[in-house]
Image (cartoon, rainbow, N blue to C red):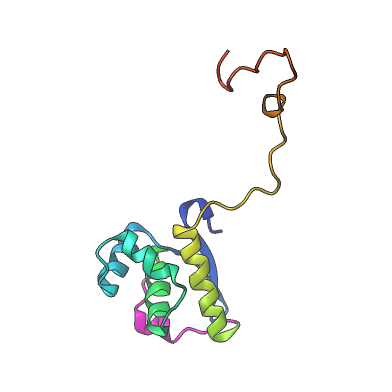
Amino acid sequence: MANRHRGEIDARFDGTTYQLCLTLGALAELESAFGDADMLALAQRFENGRLKSVDAVRIIGAGLRGGGHKISDDEVAQLKVDGGAAGFVAIVAQLLHATFGAAEPAARPPALSSAALPLREGAAPAPFPGTT
């Protein structure tokens, strides 16, 4: 099972579930393939949301190889996924989010503590959290 905290996702190709991860080596592979100078340039490339089919093949291929699968981009191009082209785009989006995106949002906001409430007139402020 994929660990999102490590940037991993699970994806199903040709009826088989694979783990994908854009490791540092996979990101270096993508920098080289796209001619980007660094990881920031690579992330900015993906921010615009526009992908060519060959981009999706490269990203999925790098993710599969980062996940430990020995597969070429030519083999990736032959894989099938539920949802067709939209399915591939969804996998790419999940992988990029797991790699570059923010942490998953909390299920619900944390409860307010009394330290976060406004002071009543004449009351002493609560100590800073973690101090005595």
Where is the N terminus found, in terms of image quarters? bottom right
Residue 33 in sight in this render: yes
* Front residue of 114 and 24: 114
Q: Residue furthest front?
A: 121
- Give the magenta part as a residue range: 69-82
Q: Is residue 88 above or below residue 110?
A: below
**Residue 121 screen position, x and y as percent:** 74, 17
* Front residue of 106 and 47: 47
**Residue 92 screen position, x and y as percent:** 48, 72
Give the residue drawn at x 24%, y 64%. 37
Q: Majority secondary structure of the magenta segment?
A: loop
Examine the structure image and report whether residue 13 is included in the region drawn in magenta.
Answer: no
Residue 64 in sight in this render: no
Q: In this image, 118 relative to 31: left or right?
A: right
Examine the structure image and report whether residue 75 is included in the region drawn in magenta.
Answer: yes
Q: In this image, 13 relative to 75: left or right?
A: right
Give the residue drawn at x 61%, y 17%. 127
Please tell me in which quadrant of the rendered image residue 58 appears: bottom left
Give the residue drawn at x 44%, y 58%. 100
Q: Is residue 78 above or below residue 104?
A: below
Please tell me in which quadrant of the rendered image residue 66 appears: bottom left
Total marks placed: 0
**Residue 113 screen position, x and y as percent:** 71, 28
* Front residue of 122 and 107: 122
**Residue 38 screen position, x and y as percent:** 27, 61
